[in-house]
Amino acid sequence: MPRQDVLSLVIYFIGLIFLAYPLGTYISRVLEGDIPAFIRWLKPLEGIIYKVTGCNPGTDQKARHYLKDLLAFNLAGLIILFTLLLTQGMLPLNPQNFPGLTWDLAFNTATSFITNTNWQAYSGEASLSYFSQMVGLGTQNFLSAATGLAIVAVLARGLVRKESGKVGNFSADLVRSTIYILLPLSIILAILLISQGVVQSYSSYIVARTIEGADHIIPLGPAASQIAIKQLGTNGGGFFGMNSAHPFENPTPFSNFLQVLAILLIPLAQVFAFGRMLKKPKEGYALVTTMFLLMLPLLALALISEHQGIPELAVNLEGKEVRTGITDSVLWGITTTAASNGSVNAMHSSFTPLAALAFIFQILTGEVIFGGSGSGLYGMALYAIITLFLAGLMVGRSPEWLGKKIEAYEVRLALIAILVPCALILIGVSIGLTHPWGVTALSHQGPHGLSELLYGFASTVGNNGSAYAGLSANSPVLNTVFGLCMLIGRFVVLIPIVLIAGNISFKKSTPVSSGTFPTDGPLFIILLAGVVLIFGALTFFPVLALGPIAEHLLMAAGQYF
C-alpha cells in the first residue's frame, strides 16, 4: 500500500477521534437537558414544537409509555411517507413530473427510511420528486437518527437511576436530538459540501447536447442538504442512484473525506456520550476500544486483499472510486458497513471476496461495530449483557452491570434481540435460493450469487441499506419481503432494549466489592469482542463458507463468477 495511503488513514482516524470526543460531551449534555449556552438561541424553536404538538417535555415516562409513544410516532411516520410517495405526482416541487410510486416500492421505501435503513430499490433522479426527497425522505433521515439517539439516553438512564422505573420523555429526547445535534451539524456539513461542488438546486434537469449530437440529461436537485444528514444520521440513502459514487454527490477528494468522516462521527461520539451520562467515562472508553478491536482487523483484511488484487489484473480498479483510489474505497466500505449507514462510493460486488467478507461480516454482527445513530451502542449493550451473564456463570456470581443485577428477564430479551435477526437472515436466504423471486433477482451464479442474496437480507434486516450492486431488488415480492425485514430488524432490537432499560431502572444499585467484575478493563473488552465474534462465527460461518470464502478459493484457482 502506498505511503500516502497509510498517512491518509492515520489522518482519518486521528481526525475522527479528535472531533468525536468533544462532540460526545456535547451530546451527553443535550440528552440530559443541559443545553450549552452557545446553542440556546434554538430554545424558542424547541418550545414552539412542544406547543404545536401538545407535548409536555417535563413528564418522566416509564419504559412502556416511552415505548408506546416511540412506536406510535414511527407508525405515523410510516403512514405519512407511504402516502406521500404514492401521491407524489399530485404534489409540488416535481419539475420532472414523476408519477407516484407503485404500492410495493412505496412501502419498501417508507419502511426503509423510518427504520434508518435507507435501502433503495429505486434510482432517485429517475423516480422521486424534489418534494419527496426533501419533505419525505429528508425528514425521516432526521427523525430516524434522532430516535436512535433517544435510545442511548434511555439505556444510560436505566443504568444510572435507582428504583425509579422512569427512563425519560420520548418527545423531549426526539426534539432535542434533532434541533440541537443533527440539525446544526447537518447545516455545517451541507455548507462544506456545497463549497466542494455538491449540487443544491431546485431547477429542472438540464438537457445538454453531446459532441456526437445526442441529448444527455443532467439531473439536479437539493442534494447537499440531504447528503449531509444521510451521512451524519447514518442513513446512507443517496439523492442519486449511484449514491456517493455520483460526482454530484461526491465531487472531490475533500468531499469524500468529509463524508466518510461524517459516517462514523456520531456513532463514535455517542459512545463517549454514553460514558459521560453514566458518570463513568471509562465505560465509554472500553466500548470504543472493543469496537476498534473488531473493526481494524477487518479493515486490514480488506486492504490487504484489495491491494493484492486479482492475479490477472495489475490494479483492480473495476467498480472502485478511481478518483481517490483503492484505499479510500475500502475505507468507505468498512465504515459504511461498520455503521448502519449504507452509502457507497464504490460497488461492493466488485471488491475481492475477502474484502466483501469483511463488509458482510460487520453487517451480520448486528452492526455493533460502531453501528448507527444510537443503534450501534444499544446493539453492543445487548452483547455486553450476554458477556456479563457468561462471565457470571464462569465465576459463580450473579452478573452485574454498574451495580445493577442482570437477571433472566434481561438475558432473555437480549437473546431475542440478537438471535431473531440472525434467524431471519438465514431463513430469508434459504427461501430466496429455492424460489424464483430470489433466484431471478441474482446477477451472478455460484458463490457470488449467494453473496448477493446474503448481503441483501443482511443489509435490510441489519438496517444497513447498502447493496452488493448485483441484486435486482425492485420486484413486488422482494420489495415486500425486504420491507418487512427492515421493520422486524429495527424493532425486534429496539423494543427489547427499552424494556431492559426500564426494568434495570427499577433495581437497586449494589455497592462495588472485591467480587465485582469491572466493565471498564481489558478483560471485559476481550470477552465482549470474543462474544461478538463467536456469535457471528457460529451463526454465519456455514453461509460465509459457501459464499465469499468459497469464491476466494475458486478465484485463486482461476475461476470467476
Image: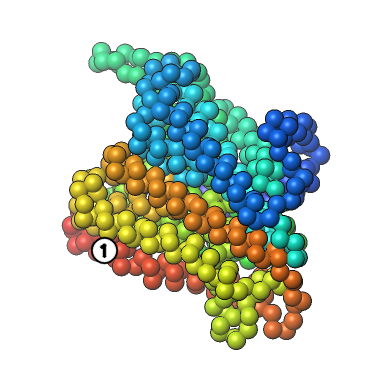
**Position of 233 relative to 240 (above/below):** below
Residue 197 lies left or right of residue 471; in this view the side is right
Rendered position, 500 above or below 399: above
Residue drawn at (53%, 28%), measured in percent from left and top?
135
> Foreground residue, 209 or 183?
183
Furthest-right residue in this view:
37
Q: Residue at x 36, y 26 (%)?
A: 126
Percent coordinates x, y for residue 137 in the rendering: 49, 33
Q: In the shown orientation, is residue 290 left or right of residue 276?
A: left
**Relative to 358, does residue 342 appear above or below in the rendering?**
above
Q: Is residue 313 left or right of residue 456?
A: left
The residue singled out by tag 1 in the image is 546
The reply to whether residue 543 is visible in this rendering is yes
Q: Residue at x 43, y 56 (%)?
A: 363
10 Å neighbourhood of mark 1: few (<14), some, or many (≥20)? some
Q: Position of residue 225 (x, y in %)?
A: 55, 30
**Does residue 325 show up?**
no
Callout 1, which amino acid? Answer: Leu
Name the residue at the bottom extreme.
396
Observer-nearest residue: 498 or 448? 498
How many numbered marks appear?
1
Name the residue nearer the viewer: 552 or 436: 436
Q: Position of residue 123 (x, y in %)?
A: 36, 32
Which element type, helix, strand or loop, lies under badge 1?
helix
Quadrant the N terminus occupies: bottom left
The residue that appears at 36% across and 14% down in the rendered structure is 207
